[in-house]
């Protein structure tokens, strides 16, 4: 029987839960303390992204060696496309599907769909591009 998730995917999910909680709790606390909404969101999402990068790099993909600047640039690019490109597109494309639901669900369901699609996007690109294992150097053939 094939496993539903491999260890790396499970670690990715745990990191995702952690950085989402940091974002949500940070935003809620900052906003409750009177921080303007945009500033509270900017601080909380940036903190969540920093945690996500750090934990995905060291824990999920175990790619802590070399290329940190390249990884940061690619991570911000991939994550930004997921957050600010893919999610809104999926929300727009699925709003009609959920239109008959109660208002709160009609708002939340397309967002959840966007999160799910962006999650797949993020994992695929983090594992294949951002945190890909370093290529092993080619070995010279031994000649006797």
Image (cartoon, rainbow, N blue to C red):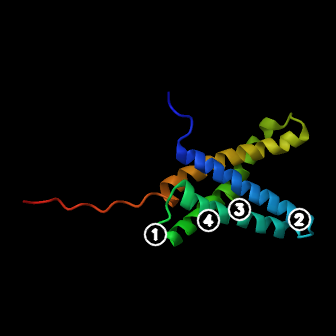
Query: What whole-number distance in Å separates the C-alpha atoms at marks 4 and 1?
Result: 17 Å
Q: Is residue 109 left or right of residue 104?
A: left
Residue position marked by numbered label 3 in the rendering? 48
Image x and y of residue 93, in percent? 73, 44
Which badge, 3 or 1, is on the more N-terminal residue?
Answer: 3
Q: Are marks 4 and 2 in contact (CB under 8 Å)?
A: no
Residue name at image x 86 percent, y 66 percent:
30
Query: Which mark is first along the chain, 3 or 4?
Result: 3
Secondary structure type for disc 4? helix
Q: Using the numbered discs, state the Cα–Cα distance from disc 4 to disc 2 in whole angstroms.
A: 25 Å
Q: Distance between the residues labelled 4 and 3?
A: 12 Å
Which residue is labeled 1 in the image?
A: 66
Are the residues at dot 4 and dot 3 in contact (C-beta closer than 8 Å)? no
Mark 1 secondary-structure assignment: loop
| The C terminus - image quarter | bottom left
Q: To which residue does mark 4 refer?
A: 76
Near mark 3 (Cα within 10 A), the count class, few <14, some 14-19 or many ≥20, is many
Q: Which residue bears the numbered disc 2?
A: 31
Quarter where residue 84 is shown:
bottom right
């Amino acid at each position: 029987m094939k496993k539903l998730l491999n260890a790396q995917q499970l670690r990715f999910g745990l990191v995702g839960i952690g950085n989402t909680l940091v974002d949500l709790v940070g935003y809620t606390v900052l906003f409750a303390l009177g921080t303007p909404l945009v500033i509270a969101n900017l601080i909380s999402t940036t903190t969540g992204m920093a945690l996500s990068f750090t934990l995905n790099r060291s824990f999920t993909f175990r790619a802590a060696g070399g290329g940190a600047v390249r990884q940061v640039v690619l991570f911000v690019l991939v994550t930004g496309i997921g957050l600010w490109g893919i999610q809104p597109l999926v929300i727009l494309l699925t709003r009609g599907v959920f239109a008959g639901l109660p208002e709160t669900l009609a708002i939340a369901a397309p967002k959840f769909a966007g999160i799910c699609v962006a999650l797949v996007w993020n994992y695929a690109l983090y594992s294949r591009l951002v945190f890909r294992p370093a290529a092993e150097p080619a070995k010279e053939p031994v000649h006797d």
